[in-house]
Image: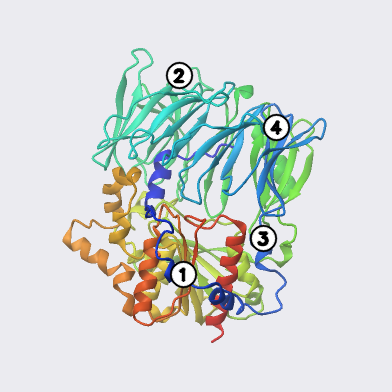
């Protein structure tokens, strides 16, 4: 019911755009550059005013969250926060009401957790944000705890739980740090068996296709870094035959086998081989032919489905995609009824089925909107009753929250650009307000979405609007739109952001003399480039785990991203090509620091495996060398973005102080 299917290839390519490795030292980077506690506290003190809401109201973790129903429907699991802000996992027996602490969060965050079977849970955890996730399993009473992947410097690629067994299939870069291979793990005993060998690191397998029984049915080879070759197993001969050979920019991804059909070779595939927008088709993998189109949209990519379980013979429940807002298309009779009942209850709010038991008798539903952080409900499919379980952020009143408004405008060269602006209530009263421009990360394949955003709501509570532009290279709007931003990072992609700012000013919403730019990852890079490219447009900027030097960024890729370096050259710039290397230098902020005239605040996680701390150190050191003071926050227990509650709160307190200081000069 709750499977939103993303392909491994999409996740890998998205991640690599912002990936690099931290240097090995006692304290990463140059600790002498980091601003003192006193300096940051002084910054925080600038956020003065009689505000109804504090940073903690938006960024303190909910008291309870991440509710899940056990496969047999007998237990309810959830995270609950203690007095030290640790989020432990508890299990409640729904018959007796007995509650047991199953998983204890200690120094490192429990990144994700879930049910393996009716008696056992899994969770993932890394060290200080280094993203080398380990997979753990424990019984629901916390006993028989095992690290299922107990290898230093090794990370999980994906985890595929085999229903009604004690096994999961996991991919690991255990034998060669550059490539991932599949293993079958008994999650009770910890016994591990390698299923397949990834023999050629120069032309590696970068994705595996398993059926619901855990049998390897296909794989993808990345040849020469740019060609994707999809192989599929002939069930009669056992041989893996070449099915498709495509350019890496094209999409042909097998999402799930159609186990509702008697045809064992039938699968749901998301593809754009014969279209600009990705669409879902039913495909016969043996015949290498489309059976029929399942769903497509003329404006947006479609690539997510949810299938029922064995109890309803794996029928297709619904299709979903990101349009202007989240869109769900009910397909099965079961889900059509669920959707109709929930829609009549929740109106135009968005809702998602996030957990269910194997019989779909009880569904856990999250309801939210642009003004509602989220509420958990339990829906009984037999009685049709709906019961509120928890309001995640009861302190945030919907009537006080700001509207996130979808926008659309033309770029200077004629492209249609989509985005969102969150407007504080002063705009409705005719006032012009300060603006925070917030370019997203990635940059390619990522986009901003409509919905509750704690950042934009926090900024609105201080009277600031927030602009989010899905500039060219963003995902979700088709192949042509995404590829139009390749080799335009720091250039036309920035033009689109600037055109969005001009659009917002033109609507009469914005005080053009009070505009800040802030972003994380590629958004941090875009912050630096915004201050360089159009310094007259911005009052100040906040660079959060952003790239400052494309050359050192490329050099610091870890081993497991090296097979994708040719793709990165096509998306960013080919540094082996003198002309493109020249462009890369022109759009590397560290070489353009003389153009930075407006105040800058830099923030970094010391263990960041995506954007090395050296990227932030470089820009801070270079600016300070020319007498330009830069407040610099580093957290030594964080990675690519802050996950710990206290760190997140301090970050946003400092950011608000920085904005207040510069908007009120």
Comparing 509 with 613, the one in front is 613
Viewed as shown, does residue 135 lie left or right of 206? right
Q: In the rendered view, tell whether residue 377 sits above or below residue 412.
A: above
Helix, strand or loop at label 4? It is loop
Cα–Cα span, label 2 and label 4: 39 Å
Cα–Cα span, label 3 and label 1: 36 Å
Between discs 2 and 1, the one toward the N terminus: 1
Q: Which residue is denoted by mark 1 in the rendering?
A: 34
Q: Residues within 10 Å of mark 3 (few under 14, many from 20)?
A: many
Q: Which residue is denoted by mark 2 in the rendering?
A: 264
Viewed as shown, does residue 156 lie left or right of 489? right
Which of the two marks, 4 or 3, is nearer to us in this view?
Answer: 4
Q: Quadrant of residue 112?
A: top right
Cα–Cα span, label 4 and label 3: 37 Å
Cα–Cα span, label 2 and label 1: 58 Å
Which of the two marks, 3 or 1, is nearer to us in this view?
Answer: 1
Q: Residue furthest left?
A: 578
Query: Does the residue at mark 3 contact the one at mark 1 (Cβ under 8 Å)?
Result: no
Residue 343 rendering spot, x and y as whole percentages? 70, 45
Q: In the rendered view, tell whether residue 186 sits above or below residue 227.
A: above
Q: Which residue is denoted by mark 4 in the rendering?
A: 141
Q: Which residue is denoted by mark 3 in the rendering?
A: 371
Helix, strand or loop at label 2? It is loop
Helix, strand or loop at label 1? It is loop
Name the residue: 65% across, 71% down: 461
Cα–Cα span, label 3 and label 2: 45 Å
């Amino acid at each position: 019911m709750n499977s939103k299917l993303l392909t491994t290839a999409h996740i890998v390519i998205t991640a690599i755009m912002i990936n690099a490795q931290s240097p090995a030292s006692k304290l990463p980077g140059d600790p002498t550059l980091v601003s003192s506690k006193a300096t940051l506290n002084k910054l925080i003190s600038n956020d003065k005013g009689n505000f109804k809401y504090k940073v903690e109201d938006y960024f303190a973790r909910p008291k309870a969250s991440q509710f899940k129903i056990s496969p047999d429907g007998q237990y309810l699991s959830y995270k609950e926060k203690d007095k030290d802000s640790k989020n432990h996992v508890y299990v409640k027996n729904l018959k007796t009401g007995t509650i047991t602490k199953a998983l204890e969060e200690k120094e490192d965050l429990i990144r994700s957790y879930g049910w393996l079977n009716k008696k056992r849970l899994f969770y993932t955890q890394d060290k200080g944000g280094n993203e080398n996730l380990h997979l753990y399993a424990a019984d629901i009473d916390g006993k028989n705890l095992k690290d299922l992947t107990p290898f230093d410097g090794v990370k999980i690629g994906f985890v595929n739980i085999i229903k009604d067994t004690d096994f999961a299939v996991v991919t690991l870069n255990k034998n060669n740090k550059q490539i991932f291979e599949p293993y079958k793990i008994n999650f009770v005993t910890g016994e591990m068996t390698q299923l397949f060998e990834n023999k050629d690191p120069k032309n590696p397998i970068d994705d595996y296709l398993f059926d619901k029984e855990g049998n390897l049915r296909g794989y993808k080879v990345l040849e020469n870094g740019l060609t994707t070759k999809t192989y599929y197993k002939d069930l009669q001969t056992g041989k893996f035959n070449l099915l498709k050979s495509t350019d890496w920019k094209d999409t042909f991804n097998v999402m799930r086998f159609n186990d509702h059909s008697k045809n064992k070779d039938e699968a749901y595939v998301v593809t754009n081989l014969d279209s600009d927008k990705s669409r879902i088709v039913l495909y016969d993998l043996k015949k290498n032919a489309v059976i029929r189109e399942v769903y497509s949209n003329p404006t947006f990519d479609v690539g997510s489905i949810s299938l029922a379980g064995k109890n309803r013979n794996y029928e297709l429940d619904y299709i979903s995609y990101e349009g202007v807002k989240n869109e769900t298309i009910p397909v099965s009779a079961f889900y059509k009824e669920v959707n109709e009942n929930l829609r009549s209850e929740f109106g135009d709010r968005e809702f998602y089925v996030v957990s269910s038991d194997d019989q779909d008798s009880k569904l856990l539903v999250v309801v939210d909107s642009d003004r509602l952080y989220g509420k958990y409900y339990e829906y009984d499919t037999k009685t049709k009753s709906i019961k509120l379980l928890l309001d995640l952020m009861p302190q945030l009143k919907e009537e006080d929250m700001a509207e996130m408004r979808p926008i659309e405008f033309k770029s200077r060269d004629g492209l249609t650009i989509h985005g969102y602006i969150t407007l504080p209530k002063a705009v409705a009263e005719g006032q012009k307000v300060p603006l925070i421009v917030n370019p997203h990360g990635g940059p390619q394949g990522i986009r901003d979405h409509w919905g509750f955003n704690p950042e934009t709501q926090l900024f609105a509570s201080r009277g600031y609007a927030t602009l989010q532009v899905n500039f060219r290279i963003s995902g979700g709007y088709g192949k042509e739109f995404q590829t139009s931003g390749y080799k335009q990072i720091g250039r036309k992609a920035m033009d689109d952001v600037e055109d969005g700012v001009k659009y917002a000013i033109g609507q009469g919403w914005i005080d053009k003399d009070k505009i800040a730019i802030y972003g994380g990852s590629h958004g941090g890079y875009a912050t630096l480039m915004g201050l360089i490219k159009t310094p007259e447009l911005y009052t100040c900027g906040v660079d959060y785990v952003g790239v400052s030097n494309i050359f050192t960024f490329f050099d610091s890729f870890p081993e497991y991203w090296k097979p994708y370096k040719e793709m990165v050259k096509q998306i960013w710039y080919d540094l082996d090509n003198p002309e493109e290397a020249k462009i890369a230098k022109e759009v590397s902020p560290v070489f353009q620091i003389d153009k930075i005239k407006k105040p800058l605040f830099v923030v970094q996680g010391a263990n960041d495996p995506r954007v090395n701390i050296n990227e932030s150190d470089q820009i801070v050191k270079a600016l300070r060398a020319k007498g330009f003071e830069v407040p610099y926050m580093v957290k030594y227990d964080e990675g690519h973005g802050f996950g710990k509650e206290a760190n997140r709160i301090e970050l946003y307190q400092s950011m608000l102080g920085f904005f207040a200081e510069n908007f009120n000069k």
